[in-house]
Image (cartoon, rainbow, N blue to C red):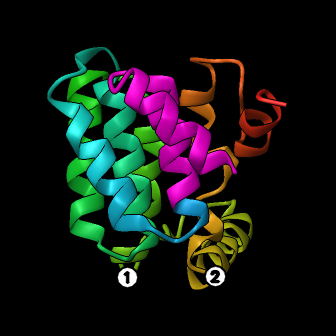
Amino acid sequence: MARKYLESALKTDPNCIEVIFVMVQLNISEQKYEDAIEMLKGRINSDEKYADILHVHLGDIYLCLKQYSEAIIHYRKALLINPNHQGARQGLERVNKIVTPNHDDDDDEDGEEEDEEDDELDDELEDGDSYLNNDTFEDSSDLFNTSSIDDFDDSFN
């Protein structure tokens, strides 16, 4: 039901970034990652205002798909646009923990806590798309009043 409303809204205004973000979220929830990637990539060059957020979302999707080099590229592009973007910094940290075999410091007093975080990240990535949930789109949900697909769908009822 939500897809029908989103597609209709995109026909009315194909540049509506809010609808695009919700449509991307819907595609991810339906495991249509390539569709989500194409939607985001299609907006990056034409919407500089949200380019950092678009790159972070791309990085998150590539991280979930275990395409780490692509994830790094998009997180770094987001940081070039906005050096203070926390989502991009956190994304790079997650990728580095995965691709760097010995990322733990011997001097680190919080080693156990980091190990638990690593285990949680591993579990999320093993589950595939569980990493890409509503929390992933926290930055973009601030752009509009709907924070999930269900809220978007409910707004039409």
State left or right for residue 143 relative to residue 101. right
The answer to whether 17 is drawn above or below residue 58 in the figure is: above
Percent position of residue 14, x then y: 34, 27
Percent position of residue 116, x then y: 73, 72
What kind of element bears circle 2? loop
Residue kind at label 2, given as amino acid type:
Asp
Q: Is residue 75 visible?
A: no
What kind of element bears circle 1? loop
Q: For the C terminus, which image quadrant?
A: top right
How many numbered discs? 2
Which one is in front, 128 or 151? 151
The residue wearing badge 1 is 101
Which one is in front, 84 or 81? 81
Q: Residue at (66%, 74%) from the top-left corner?
A: 115
Q: Main secondary structure of the magenta part?
A: helix
Percent position of residue 18, x then y: 51, 25
Marks 2 and 1 sit apart, C-alpha to C-alpha, by 21 Å
Q: Residue at (25%, 47%) from the top-left corner?
A: 74
User: Is residue 79 located in the magenta-colored stretch of the structure?
Assistant: no
Which one is in front, 113 or 60? 60
Percent position of residue 142, x then y: 62, 20
The residue wearing badge 2 is 127
Residue 56, quarter of picture = top left
For residue 53, the mark is none
The answer to whether 152 is drawn above or below residue 120 in the figure is: above
* Magenta range: 1-27
**Mark 2: few/some/many CA within 10 Å (<14, 14-19, 20+):** few
State left or right for residue 63 relative to residue 131. left
Which one is in front, 12 or 56? 12
The answer to whether 22 is drawn above or below residue 116 in the figure is: above
Q: In the rendered structure, which disc, 2 or 1, sits on the residue that comes first in sequence?
A: 1
